[in-house]
Structures are given as C-alpha cells and as structure tokens.
Image (spheres, rainbow, N blue to C red):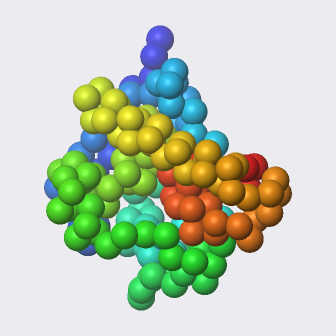
C-alpha cells in the first residue's frame, strides 16, 4: 500500500498561499533525461547564488539541507560561491525573459528543489529539464579551453554550472 502523499504549504517573502503535493520519494524517480550531478543540499554547501537565494524559505525544505549551507541573509556575497565569483543574473532579467514560472518565483533552482522533493508538474518539468540540458554547452567550452583539472580556468562558467546542478569540478 502506498503511503499518503504530503502537501507542502509555502509562506515566505516571495510566495504565500501556494500549496503543492509531493508525489514521488525525495531524490528519486527523476525523468530519464534528467540526471543532475549535485543535490540541492550539495549545491547549498558548495556555495551558490552568493548565499542569498534560500534564506527566507528554509522551512519548506529539509533542515539538513541548511546545516552546512553557505548563506548570506542580507545580500548576495560572491565570496561564498565555490569559485568566489558572481555568476548570476538579477531576477529582473529572468522575469523579462519569461524564464520564471508563476509557481516558482525564484526560478530554476526553486523548481529543482521542489522537483527533488517529489513535486511533479509534467509540462513545467519538461521545460525546466530542457533549460538544464542547454547548460551542457558550458561544459564543452570548459573542456575546449581549459587544461583538465584547472579549476582556475573559466571560474564564472564553472560557478554557473554549479547553479544548474552540474559538478564543474569534474570537467
């Protein structure tokens, strides 16, 4: 017998009154063409988005995601990023380009965290996975322009790949 599905209620600075259902076990049953190399917890521990991204919505996700997360509640601090550089565009750019789905006002990483937890929205999942796959071009650029293992080469691209759950330390 399948266990009861969990409903998550969201109440943070960017979203209130939103509820979603977890229909898959956390970290499992991803689409066949979606194989992220980093979990949300690993991304937060490695330093992504200058530590600012998830500071007001920690209640929505597992506490252990934040035990060693590099966070900056006041403002983005690129020194917290693994590569020590800013690799983010302002939210205004994401909105202007229609990259933000209304139920995920923080963008791709919020979608990924919720997908990882077990939420499924087939049409939106397909769109976000297409966007994730498009980031692979940056891996090719690193391979074409950097010596293997030279993490000082193309640090901004490497940091951007972290933001999309690709482990650019392997490239």
Q: Is residue 73 above or below residue 147?
A: below
Between 130 and 103, the residue placed more toward the observer is 130
Tell me which residue sits at (75%, 49%) in the image: 170
| Residue 11 screen position, x and y as percent | 26, 62
Residue 24 occupies which quadrant of the picture? top left
Q: Quadrant of residue 14?
A: bottom left
Q: Is residue 70 above or below residue 128?
A: below
Determine if residue 66 is in view: no
Residue at left 20%, top 61%?
Answer: 95
Identify which residue is drawn at 37% across, 51% down.
Answer: 108
Q: Along the line of sight, which residue is nearer the eye, 113 or 142?
A: 142
Along the viewing direction, whichever of 28 and 51 lies nearer the viewer: 51
Q: Is residue 68 left or right of residue 151?
A: left
Residue at the far bottom in the pictured view: 74
Q: Residue furthest top?
A: 1
Q: Position of residue 119 (x, y in %)?
A: 37, 36
Q: Locate residue 123, reporting x and y percent.
A: 25, 29
In the picture provided, is 36 more to the left or to the right than 107?
Answer: right
In the visual, does 105 lie left or right of 22?
Answer: left
Please tell me which residue is depicted at 62% across the width and 61% down the height of the picture.
Answer: 158
- Residue 19 in the figure: left or right of residue 136: left
In this orientation, which residue lies closer to the viewer: 134 or 57?
A: 134
How many numbered tags mark residues here?
0
Can residue 102 be seen here? The reply is yes
Please tell me whether residue 75 is drawn above or below residue 19 in the rendered image.
below
């Amino acid at each position: 017998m399948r266990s009861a599905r969990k409903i998550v209620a969201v109440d943070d600075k960017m979203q209130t009154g939103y509820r979603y259902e977890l229909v898959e076990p956390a970290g499992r049953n991803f689409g066949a063409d979606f194989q992220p190399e980093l979990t949300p917890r690993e991304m937060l521990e490695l330093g992504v988005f200058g530590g600012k991204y998830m500071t007001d919505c920690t209640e929505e996700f597992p506490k252990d995601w934040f035990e060693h997360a590099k966070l900056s509640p006041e403002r983005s601090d690129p020194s917290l990023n693994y590569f020590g550089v800013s690799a983010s565009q302002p939210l205004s750019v994401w909105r202007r380009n229609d990259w933000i789905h209304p139920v995920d006002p923080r963008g791709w990483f919020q979608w990924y965290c919720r997908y990882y937890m077990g939420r499924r929205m087939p049409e939106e999942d397909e769109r976000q996975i297409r966007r994730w796959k498009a980031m692979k071009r940056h891996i090719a650029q690193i391979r074409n322009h950097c010596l293997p293992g030279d993490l000082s080469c193309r640090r901004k691209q490497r940091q951007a790949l972290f933001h999309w759950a690709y482990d650019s330390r392997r490239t």
